[in-house]
Amino acid sequence: MTAPRWRRRLYILLFLTAAFLLGSTSQEQLGLSFSVEGLQQFRQWVQSLGWWGPGVFVLLVIFRLFIGLSSHLVLILGGLAFGLAGGILWGCLGLVISALVLFYLARLLGADWVRDRFGNQYMVMLERIQRVGALAIFAITAHPLGLLTPAHLAAGLVGLTAAQFAAAVALAVPIRTVPYVFLGTAVLDLTWVQALAIAAVMLVVFALPLCSPKFRAWMWGGGT
């Protein structure tokens, strides 16, 4: 491997390390937790940022992996902080940018790096995207329980153009975003029993297609 390529990988790894450390520190400082106090604190903090608030939230969506948060939880925070319309808009924007970051990260670091970290999960996604193309990206991204990170990393290694990938993700993310943002808009106005009931109904609806072995095999290679 040439020296410039080694340097490029070193810079990327340093960036990932810095992002992880920054994300962990931010999570601790902001007190991101799903207690009533934590949610109220997050909403007050975002609203105190004024026009900077949406930009900071989009960065939170993009770098959520380094903070240890899933897309589901971050989208709920978006509904909490910005309401239905704002949560959908900024959540979708963050997910599209995040997907493109993963797409290009896989291209830069290569298949070995991705395989070492995601193993069989990555190989299943890779085979599916090779066979179905951008439609697989759309389906995995749109389903609220789809595994975004390995799918978007795999997409960077199968010959999809950036335009094809971006179009599939952009069409899918509103479908994924709406239910979680809706839950976020109501989470502090409901009792915990009501919020959990809504979350349980949403989970059942999302999981129903997974009861089909054929759908589950297509989506996740036979596992959940």
Image (cartoon, rainbow, N blue to C red):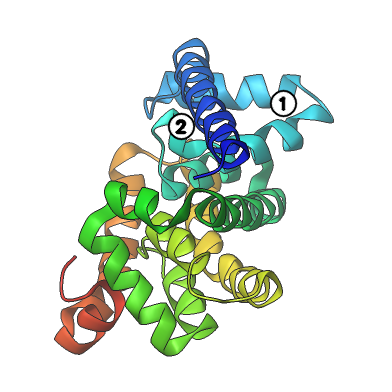
Residue in the foreground of this view, choosing between 140 and 74: 140
Residue placed under numbered mark 2 in the picture: 66
Would you say the residues marked 1 and 2 are in contact, meaning their CB atoms lie under 8 Å apart? Answer: no
In the rendered image, the residue lying farthest to the top is 29
Q: Residue at 40% across / 44% down in the picture? A: 70
Q: Residue at 50% across / 85% down in the picture? A: 135
The amino acid type of the residue labelled 1 equals: Gln
* CA separation in Å, label 1 and label 2: 23 Å
Looking at the picture, does residue 192 appear above or below residue 50? below
Quarter of the image where one finds residue 172: bottom right
First in sequence: mark 1 vs mark 2: 1
Residue in the foreground of this view, choosing between 156 and 22: 156
Q: Position of residue 192 (x, y in %)?
A: 32, 38
Q: The residue tagged with tag 2: helix, strand or loop?
A: helix
Q: In the figure, is residue 201 to the left or right of 177?
A: left
Category of crowding for the residue at label 2, using alpha-carbon neighbours closer than 10 angstroms: few (below 14), some (14–19), many (at least 20): some
Q: Residue at 59% across / 30% down in the picture? A: 11
Quarter of the image where one finds residue 50: top right
Residue placed under numbered mark 1 in the picture: 47
Q: Residue at 48% across / 71% down in the picture? A: 142
Quarter of the image where one finds residue 56: top right
